[in-house]
Image (cartoon, rainbow, N blue to C red):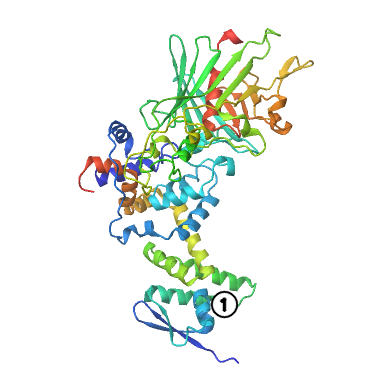
Amino acid sequence: MSFSKTIMLRNYDGETFVVDEVVAVEPQTIEHMIEDGCANTSIPLPNITSKILSKVIEHCKKHVETPNSNEKDAKADLKSFDFDFVKADQGTLFDLILAVNYLNIKGLLDLIYQTIADMIKGKTPEEEEEMRRVNAWVFSCFVGVTCLYFKSKKI
Amino acid sequence: MSFKNIVREFKEMTTDGIGSMSRRRGGEGKQKQWRNCTRAHVVPDLVAPECTTEGRWAHLPPELLLDIIRRVEESETSWPARTTVVYCASVCKPWRDVTKEIVKTPEECGRLTFPISLKQPGPRDSPIQCYIKRDRATSTFRLYYGLTPSEDESDKLLLAAKRIRRATSTEFLISLVADDFSRASSTYVGKLRSNFLGTKFSIYDSQPPNDEAFQANHSRSSRRFHTKQVSPRLPACNYNIATISYELNVLRTRGPRRMNCSLHYIPISSIQEGGTAPTPKSFPQENLLPSTSSSLSSSLSLPLPLSSPLVKEKPLPGDACNDYLVLKNKSPRWHEQLQCWCLNFKGRVTVASVKNFQLVASVGSSDNVSDAEQNKVILQFGKIGQDIFTMDYRYPISAYQAFAICLSSFDTKPACE
């Protein structure tokens, strides 16, 4: 019984991705759906865009295809793939983390958590300020709420 | 307050750490203005504006945020790297809530993070080690976190004190920063005052250590009274949290002096089996925002009748304990061969000085305190060089209390030596 079965994933944009089952079951959410018999037609993933879904599939494929051996080369190859994989802008990382959390892919989730944590730790003060500036509307509300309330009418 | 001002202040904040991170909200001028606006305008609940692409990180689901910030907190354990954890708490409110949830008190994890850590009891097992630098020229004393001064002077400043000599007493004003000792400032923590002879000192704190007891009694779960109320704001005054007294040793005229320190807000039960010491969760200014309780009625809360049993269960703020803890200094032994008084400072004190001391709990046999607890050195202070002193403290006292007690050692007059 070795024919490769494929699974269809239909995403937010309406686009359909056809992936091998071995790849598709990397995300635990999809694995459970298949087990529960909900994957007869296509699996809907309405909250994930094409760009993010294709990235996720690429990651799952790579990890499935790489032999699970203790060979240095294989491990190094995987590590360098992961390293390049998370070199994305903040917006993409944000979407990725939400998608991977929904799909429940533990390995990838840990990788993204660590990437974001490292970004927070390794930030230069300018980058830190940029992040705060970007979120300043929330922070200013929280911190200076009384100041804004009393000082200006236009919040 | 324009957007530009907020960004400028964040820029200033990046160069500071524990001293002013979470407390300099909108600058000191603003803090003063807020204090002056005492008419109780209830600030409306925040309604988050439309989520833009830029502000998305504020809306990351809490469980994801928890994991990320936990990783940051677990890897950045010592200063100055620990500033990153404080940064996470200052990004936005959701991040702050998650970070405050993750960061444990010094008693639990042995690390200092937010300024409030300085008012929370130290760890039970091993002391937190700090050192004090004295600057004779400016009469200031600075408390740093670390074993000894580092080569590059990058140590974390925890507290600073300035001595002010008056006609009949001396005062030490204690602040979170080294350049501002103004009582109206948001960085003011408390003070130490001595009597004329320099034999008795009182430590004052701008908030009572058992703040949480007051808040617990007045929380939403208190159904006895109508709960729609502005979060209780304690009167802005100084609370006498401890008294230190020095006595001349009458047995030997040149012997070591005797020290007694009464900690009015720490009960003896804190060092008994299963006991706890008061642990404030936040500075008084942070309690000024209204509690968002669902109201049972729309009327304001009624004043608590003093005869209410609910009031008698826990001490109110401003009320010291009846059975408070007293510390005394460990008596040195006379070393006949060396012809000097000796105390085992375990290598943390290297220069002989009358200022050196070790404080242990002073308990009677009826107080039900184990021998191990009785022998624990709760505070150790001593000289290691010209104007450099080490200070090691542990549960149940906090960094602030320890610092203030050590400051008293600098001011005792010849009358008690």
Q: Residue at x 50, y 66 (%)?
A: A109
The percent position of residue B270, horizontal first and vertical second, equals 61, 34
Q: Exactly how many numbered labels are in the figure?
A: 1
Can residue A24 be spotted in the picture? yes
Q: In this image, B233 relative to B47: left or right?
A: right
Q: Quadrant of the C terminus of chain B?
A: top right
At horizontal 37% and vertical 64% (from top left) the residue drawn is: A91
Which one is in front, B15 or B94? B94
Quadrant in the picture for the N terminus of chain B: top left
Q: Secondary structure at mark 1?
A: loop
Task: Give the percent coordinates (x, y) of residue B84.
Answer: 46, 48
- Judging depth in this view, the residue of B300 and B82 nearest the camera is B300
Q: Position of residue B205 (x, y in %)?
A: 46, 27
Q: Give residue B125's quadrant in the image.
A: top right
Q: Residue furthest right?
A: B337
Q: Which residue is mark 1?
A: A66
Task: Give percent across and percent down for residue A123.
Answer: 43, 52
Looking at the image, residue B362 lies above or below residue B129: above
Q: Amino acid at mark 1?
A: Thr
Name of the residue lying farthest toward the left: A153
